[in-house]
Image (cartoon, rainbow, N blue to C red):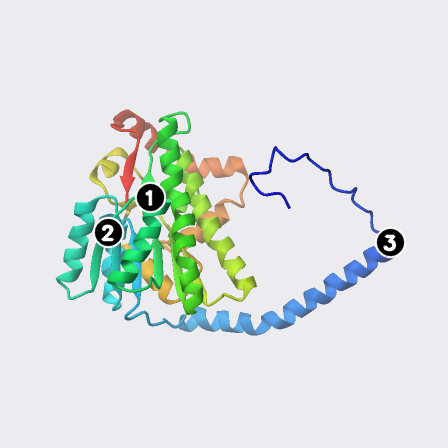
Amino acid sequence: MQTVFELGRVPYVAADPIKQQSFSEQIVFVILVLYDLIKVLVLSAPNCLISIYHCVIGKPKKCVRGQTVLITGAGNGIGRALALRFASEGCKIAIADIEWDAAVATAKILQAKNVVAKAYHMDVSDVNQLKQLKCDIEKDIGPVDILVNNAGVLPLLSLREGSDIEIERIVKVNITSQFFATRTFLPGMISRGRGHIVGISSICAVHPMPGTVIYSATKFAVNGFIQALHEELRQEGNDFIKLTSVLPYFVSTRRDLMEAVCLRFRVLSAEEVAAVAVDSVLRNELVVSVPKFNWWLSAIVNLLSLSNQGLIRDHLLRERDSRKIFYKEKKSSTLMNG
Protein backbone atom coordinates (compact mmCIF):
# COMPACT_ATOMS: atom_id res chain seq x y z
CA MET A 1 0.00 0.00 0.00
CA GLN A 2 1.44 3.38 -0.98
CA THR A 3 2.02 6.03 1.64
CA VAL A 4 0.78 9.58 1.06
CA PHE A 5 4.35 10.63 0.35
CA GLU A 6 4.73 8.04 -2.43
CA LEU A 7 1.74 9.28 -4.41
CA GLY A 8 2.94 10.79 -7.67
CA ARG A 9 6.42 9.29 -7.19
CA VAL A 10 5.66 5.57 -7.50
CA PRO A 11 4.34 4.46 -10.93
CA TYR A 12 0.60 3.86 -11.12
CA VAL A 13 -0.30 0.19 -11.43
CA ALA A 14 -3.86 -0.55 -12.53
CA ALA A 15 -5.89 -3.14 -10.65
CA ASP A 16 -6.78 -6.43 -12.29
CA PRO A 17 -9.98 -6.42 -14.38
CA ILE A 18 -13.13 -7.09 -12.37
CA LYS A 19 -14.11 -10.74 -12.64
CA GLN A 20 -17.73 -11.28 -13.58
CA GLN A 21 -19.65 -13.66 -11.33
CA SER A 22 -21.15 -16.80 -12.80
CA PHE A 23 -24.87 -17.49 -12.38
CA SER A 24 -24.22 -20.05 -9.63
CA GLU A 25 -21.94 -17.59 -7.79
CA GLN A 26 -24.67 -14.94 -7.96
CA ILE A 27 -27.19 -17.40 -6.47
CA VAL A 28 -24.82 -18.25 -3.62
CA PHE A 29 -24.19 -14.54 -3.05
CA VAL A 30 -27.92 -13.77 -2.79
CA ILE A 31 -28.48 -16.67 -0.38
CA LEU A 32 -25.64 -15.51 1.88
CA VAL A 33 -26.91 -11.93 1.89
CA LEU A 34 -30.44 -13.09 2.78
CA TYR A 35 -29.02 -15.25 5.57
CA ASP A 36 -27.08 -12.30 7.00
CA LEU A 37 -30.15 -10.07 6.67
CA ILE A 38 -32.26 -12.52 8.68
CA LYS A 39 -29.49 -12.72 11.29
CA VAL A 40 -29.40 -8.92 11.56
CA LEU A 41 -33.19 -8.74 11.99
CA VAL A 42 -33.10 -11.33 14.78
CA LEU A 43 -30.16 -9.73 16.59
CA SER A 44 -31.60 -6.23 16.24
CA ALA A 45 -34.93 -7.08 17.88
CA PRO A 46 -33.66 -6.56 21.47
CA ASN A 47 -32.02 -3.28 20.45
CA CYS A 48 -35.31 -2.07 18.96
CA LEU A 49 -37.14 -2.86 22.19
CA ILE A 50 -34.47 -1.04 24.21
CA SER A 51 -34.73 1.98 21.90
CA ILE A 52 -38.52 2.07 22.31
CA TYR A 53 -38.10 1.86 26.07
CA HIS A 54 -35.60 4.74 26.04
CA CYS A 55 -37.95 6.83 23.89
CA VAL A 56 -40.67 6.42 26.49
CA ILE A 57 -38.64 6.49 29.69
CA GLY A 58 -35.51 8.28 28.53
CA LYS A 59 -31.90 7.14 28.43
CA PRO A 60 -30.18 6.81 31.81
CA LYS A 61 -27.46 9.36 32.56
CA LYS A 62 -23.91 8.41 33.41
CA CYS A 63 -22.00 10.04 36.25
CA VAL A 64 -19.04 12.23 35.31
CA ARG A 65 -18.34 13.66 38.76
CA GLY A 66 -14.63 14.09 39.34
CA GLN A 67 -13.73 13.70 35.67
CA THR A 68 -11.50 16.19 33.86
CA VAL A 69 -13.08 18.05 30.95
CA LEU A 70 -11.01 19.96 28.40
CA ILE A 71 -12.99 22.55 26.45
CA THR A 72 -11.32 24.43 23.62
CA GLY A 73 -12.56 27.96 22.97
CA ALA A 74 -14.04 28.10 26.48
CA GLY A 75 -13.26 31.76 27.08
CA ASN A 76 -16.61 32.97 25.76
CA GLY A 77 -19.93 31.94 24.26
CA ILE A 78 -20.78 28.27 23.94
CA GLY A 79 -17.44 27.22 25.40
CA ARG A 80 -17.94 29.17 28.62
CA ALA A 81 -21.53 27.90 28.92
CA LEU A 82 -20.27 24.33 28.47
CA ALA A 83 -17.66 24.86 31.17
CA LEU A 84 -20.30 26.07 33.63
CA ARG A 85 -22.61 23.20 32.75
CA PHE A 86 -19.97 20.49 33.13
CA ALA A 87 -18.86 22.12 36.38
CA SER A 88 -22.41 21.74 37.72
CA GLU A 89 -21.98 17.98 37.13
CA GLY A 90 -18.96 17.95 39.43
CA CYS A 91 -16.27 17.97 36.73
CA LYS A 92 -12.84 19.57 36.80
CA ILE A 93 -12.46 22.01 33.93
CA ALA A 94 -9.48 22.82 31.69
CA ILE A 95 -10.10 25.96 29.64
CA ALA A 96 -8.06 26.37 26.45
CA ASP A 97 -8.45 29.55 24.43
CA ILE A 98 -6.42 31.85 22.21
CA GLU A 99 -8.10 34.78 24.03
CA TRP A 100 -6.13 34.60 27.26
CA ASP A 101 -8.07 37.20 29.24
CA ALA A 102 -11.36 35.48 28.42
CA ALA A 103 -9.97 32.08 29.44
CA VAL A 104 -8.79 33.49 32.77
CA ALA A 105 -12.18 35.13 33.33
CA THR A 106 -13.97 31.79 32.79
CA ALA A 107 -11.57 30.06 35.18
CA LYS A 108 -12.21 32.71 37.85
CA ILE A 109 -15.99 32.30 37.52
CA LEU A 110 -15.61 28.56 38.08
CA GLN A 111 -13.09 28.90 40.89
CA ALA A 112 -15.49 31.24 42.69
CA LYS A 113 -17.92 28.29 42.67
CA ASN A 114 -15.24 26.05 44.25
CA VAL A 115 -14.69 24.23 40.96
CA VAL A 116 -11.24 22.92 40.07
CA ALA A 117 -10.49 24.94 36.95
CA LYS A 118 -7.44 26.25 35.13
CA ALA A 119 -6.96 28.41 32.04
CA TYR A 120 -4.48 27.63 29.28
CA HIS A 121 -3.38 30.07 26.58
CA MET A 122 -3.07 28.27 23.27
CA ASP A 123 -3.86 28.13 19.58
CA VAL A 124 -5.72 24.87 18.84
CA SER A 125 -4.42 24.83 15.27
CA ASP A 126 -0.85 24.35 16.55
CA VAL A 127 -0.08 20.64 17.01
CA ASN A 128 2.92 21.27 19.25
CA GLN A 129 0.83 23.45 21.56
CA LEU A 130 -1.76 20.67 21.80
CA LYS A 131 0.90 18.18 22.85
CA GLN A 132 2.21 20.58 25.46
CA LEU A 133 -1.34 21.24 26.64
CA LYS A 134 -1.80 17.53 27.34
CA CYS A 135 1.30 17.47 29.54
CA ASP A 136 0.27 20.64 31.38
CA ILE A 137 -3.28 19.47 32.10
CA GLU A 138 -2.14 16.06 33.32
CA LYS A 139 0.34 17.77 35.66
CA ASP A 140 -2.11 20.42 36.93
CA ILE A 141 -5.47 18.62 37.03
CA GLY A 142 -5.21 15.06 35.75
CA PRO A 143 -5.74 13.05 32.54
CA VAL A 144 -8.48 14.35 30.25
CA ASP A 145 -11.62 12.20 30.39
CA ILE A 146 -13.86 14.36 28.21
CA LEU A 147 -12.54 16.35 25.25
CA VAL A 148 -14.85 19.03 23.89
CA ASN A 149 -13.64 20.38 20.54
CA ASN A 150 -15.54 23.65 20.60
CA ALA A 151 -13.14 26.28 19.25
CA GLY A 152 -14.15 27.54 15.84
CA VAL A 153 -14.16 30.41 13.38
CA LEU A 154 -17.49 31.52 11.94
CA PRO A 155 -16.78 33.32 8.64
CA LEU A 156 -19.56 35.25 6.98
CA LEU A 157 -18.04 35.10 3.54
CA SER A 158 -18.56 33.24 0.33
CA LEU A 159 -15.93 31.08 -1.37
CA ARG A 160 -14.97 34.02 -3.61
CA GLU A 161 -14.29 36.35 -0.69
CA GLY A 162 -11.44 36.56 1.78
CA SER A 163 -7.80 35.68 1.34
CA ASP A 164 -6.15 32.31 0.93
CA ILE A 165 -4.73 32.68 4.44
CA GLU A 166 -8.22 33.26 5.87
CA ILE A 167 -9.58 30.12 4.23
CA GLU A 168 -6.63 28.09 5.47
CA ARG A 169 -7.16 29.45 8.99
CA ILE A 170 -10.86 28.52 8.97
CA VAL A 171 -10.09 24.94 7.96
CA LYS A 172 -7.29 24.59 10.50
CA VAL A 173 -9.31 25.87 13.44
CA ASN A 174 -12.68 24.31 12.58
CA ILE A 175 -11.67 20.79 11.59
CA THR A 176 -7.92 20.11 11.44
CA SER A 177 -7.56 21.09 15.10
CA GLN A 178 -10.19 18.49 15.99
CA PHE A 179 -8.19 15.80 14.21
CA PHE A 180 -5.02 16.61 16.10
CA ALA A 181 -6.67 17.27 19.47
CA THR A 182 -8.36 13.88 19.23
CA ARG A 183 -5.12 12.19 18.17
CA THR A 184 -3.45 13.79 21.18
CA PHE A 185 -5.93 12.72 23.87
CA LEU A 186 -7.60 9.56 22.48
CA PRO A 187 -4.73 7.11 23.15
CA GLY A 188 -4.77 7.97 26.85
CA MET A 189 -8.52 7.47 27.00
CA ILE A 190 -8.20 4.04 25.39
CA SER A 191 -5.44 3.00 27.78
CA ARG A 192 -7.56 4.07 30.79
CA GLY A 193 -10.66 2.36 29.42
CA ARG A 194 -12.94 5.40 29.38
CA GLY A 195 -13.39 8.69 27.58
CA HIS A 196 -15.76 10.91 25.65
CA ILE A 197 -15.04 13.13 22.65
CA VAL A 198 -17.42 15.92 21.65
CA GLY A 199 -17.37 17.83 18.38
CA ILE A 200 -19.34 21.07 18.25
CA SER A 201 -20.61 21.09 14.69
CA SER A 202 -23.55 23.13 13.36
CA ILE A 203 -26.95 22.71 11.77
CA CYS A 204 -25.00 23.79 8.65
CA ALA A 205 -23.74 20.19 8.62
CA VAL A 206 -27.16 19.08 7.36
CA HIS A 207 -28.57 22.40 6.12
CA PRO A 208 -25.71 24.36 4.51
CA MET A 209 -26.18 28.10 4.63
CA PRO A 210 -25.52 30.42 1.66
CA GLY A 211 -22.69 32.84 2.25
CA THR A 212 -20.88 30.41 4.58
CA VAL A 213 -19.44 27.93 2.11
CA ILE A 214 -16.15 27.22 3.92
CA TYR A 215 -17.80 27.18 7.33
CA SER A 216 -20.55 24.78 6.19
CA ALA A 217 -17.96 22.48 4.64
CA THR A 218 -15.94 22.32 7.85
CA LYS A 219 -19.05 21.61 9.92
CA PHE A 220 -20.01 18.78 7.55
CA ALA A 221 -16.50 17.48 8.20
CA VAL A 222 -16.85 17.71 11.99
CA ASN A 223 -20.08 15.71 11.96
CA GLY A 224 -18.61 13.13 9.58
CA PHE A 225 -15.43 12.91 11.64
CA ILE A 226 -17.29 12.11 14.85
CA GLN A 227 -19.51 9.48 13.23
CA ALA A 228 -16.64 7.84 11.32
CA LEU A 229 -14.46 7.70 14.44
CA HIS A 230 -17.35 6.22 16.42
CA GLU A 231 -17.68 3.39 13.92
CA GLU A 232 -13.94 2.79 13.76
CA LEU A 233 -13.66 2.51 17.54
CA ARG A 234 -16.71 0.25 17.69
CA GLN A 235 -15.24 -2.16 15.17
CA GLU A 236 -11.93 -2.18 17.05
CA GLY A 237 -13.67 -3.13 20.30
CA ASN A 238 -13.03 0.31 21.83
CA ASP A 239 -16.70 1.24 22.03
CA PHE A 240 -16.25 2.28 25.66
CA ILE A 241 -14.98 5.54 24.14
CA LYS A 242 -18.12 7.57 23.50
CA LEU A 243 -18.57 10.33 20.94
CA THR A 244 -21.10 13.10 20.47
CA SER A 245 -21.61 15.51 17.58
CA VAL A 246 -23.62 18.62 18.51
CA LEU A 247 -25.41 20.53 15.74
CA PRO A 248 -26.80 23.81 17.08
CA TYR A 249 -28.85 26.33 15.16
CA PHE A 250 -27.56 29.92 15.07
CA VAL A 251 -26.32 30.96 18.53
CA SER A 252 -26.24 34.43 20.02
CA THR A 253 -22.58 34.94 20.88
CA ARG A 254 -20.61 37.95 19.60
CA ARG A 255 -22.39 41.28 19.22
CA ASP A 256 -20.84 42.07 15.83
CA LEU A 257 -22.01 38.70 14.55
CA MET A 258 -25.57 39.28 15.73
CA GLU A 259 -25.62 42.74 14.13
CA ALA A 260 -24.47 41.31 10.80
CA VAL A 261 -27.22 38.72 10.34
CA CYS A 262 -30.99 38.81 10.16
CA LEU A 263 -32.70 35.46 10.73
CA ARG A 264 -36.41 34.76 10.63
CA PHE A 265 -36.43 32.27 13.50
CA ARG A 266 -35.28 32.76 17.08
CA VAL A 267 -31.59 32.33 17.71
CA LEU A 268 -30.37 30.19 20.58
CA SER A 269 -28.55 31.20 23.72
CA ALA A 270 -25.20 29.61 24.54
CA GLU A 271 -26.76 28.22 27.72
CA GLU A 272 -29.45 26.38 25.73
CA VAL A 273 -26.83 24.72 23.55
CA ALA A 274 -24.68 23.79 26.54
CA ALA A 275 -27.65 22.24 28.36
CA VAL A 276 -28.51 19.96 25.43
CA ALA A 277 -24.85 19.16 24.67
CA VAL A 278 -23.97 18.11 28.22
CA ASP A 279 -27.21 16.15 28.60
CA SER A 280 -26.35 14.31 25.36
CA VAL A 281 -22.89 13.48 26.68
CA LEU A 282 -24.39 12.11 29.89
CA ARG A 283 -26.75 9.93 27.82
CA ASN A 284 -24.01 8.87 25.33
CA GLU A 285 -25.93 10.16 22.31
CA LEU A 286 -23.97 10.16 19.06
CA VAL A 287 -25.64 13.03 17.18
CA VAL A 288 -27.90 15.72 18.59
CA SER A 289 -29.19 18.97 17.13
CA VAL A 290 -30.27 22.03 19.07
CA PRO A 291 -33.26 22.31 19.01
CA LYS A 292 -33.52 18.54 18.78
CA PHE A 293 -36.23 18.56 16.08
CA ASN A 294 -33.91 20.44 13.67
CA TRP A 295 -32.06 17.26 12.70
CA TRP A 296 -35.23 15.48 11.63
CA LEU A 297 -36.67 18.58 9.98
CA SER A 298 -33.53 19.08 7.90
CA ALA A 299 -33.43 15.37 7.00
CA ILE A 300 -37.03 15.53 5.75
CA VAL A 301 -36.37 18.72 3.75
CA ASN A 302 -33.34 17.07 2.12
CA LEU A 303 -35.61 14.30 0.81
CA LEU A 304 -37.51 16.83 -1.30
CA SER A 305 -36.54 17.87 -4.81
CA LEU A 306 -33.96 20.65 -5.12
CA SER A 307 -36.57 23.02 -6.52
CA ASN A 308 -38.84 22.47 -3.51
CA GLN A 309 -35.90 22.85 -1.15
CA GLY A 310 -35.25 26.18 -2.82
CA LEU A 311 -38.85 27.26 -2.24
CA ILE A 312 -38.53 26.45 1.46
CA ARG A 313 -35.29 28.42 1.69
CA ASP A 314 -36.71 31.42 -0.18
CA HIS A 315 -40.24 31.66 1.26
CA LEU A 316 -40.20 29.90 4.63
CA LEU A 317 -36.67 30.48 5.88
CA ARG A 318 -36.19 33.65 3.77
CA GLU A 319 -32.46 33.02 3.50
CA ARG A 320 -32.17 35.15 0.38
CA ASP A 321 -33.57 38.19 2.19
CA SER A 322 -31.27 37.58 5.17
CA ARG A 323 -28.27 37.36 2.88
CA LYS A 324 -29.16 40.67 1.18
CA ILE A 325 -29.38 42.39 4.55
CA PHE A 326 -26.10 40.87 5.62
CA TYR A 327 -24.18 42.00 2.54
CA LYS A 328 -25.69 45.47 2.83
CA GLU A 329 -24.55 45.90 6.44
CA LYS A 330 -21.40 43.79 6.30
CA LYS A 331 -18.54 45.31 8.25
CA SER A 332 -15.95 42.53 8.22
CA SER A 333 -15.42 39.34 6.26
CA THR A 334 -14.65 37.03 9.17
CA LEU A 335 -16.15 36.98 12.66
CA MET A 336 -15.05 34.76 15.50
CA ASN A 337 -17.41 32.42 17.34
CA GLY A 338 -16.45 30.32 20.36
* Residue at mark 2: 120
Please identify, in this view, whether the residue under mark 2 or under mark 3 is nearer the observer.
2
Type of the residue with mark 1? Gly
* Residue at mark 1: 152
Please identify, in this view, whether the residue under mark 2 or under mark 1 is nearer the observer.
2
Mark 2 or 3 closer to N-term? 3
Whether residue 270 is visible here, answered yes or no, is no
Q: In the image, 112: left or right of 19? A: left
Type of the residue with mark 3? Phe
Q: Residue at x 35, y 46 (%)?
A: 128
**Residue reaching furthest to the left:** 112
Q: Residue 260 location, x and y as percent? A: 26, 33
Q: Residue at x 21, y 54 (%)?
A: 119
Q: Residue at x 30, y 44 (%)?
A: 123
* Residue at mark 3: 23
Quadrant housing residue 85: bottom left
> How many angstroms separate mark 3 from mark 1 (CA)?
54 Å
Q: Secondary structure at mark 1?
A: strand
Q: Secondary structure at mark 3?
A: helix
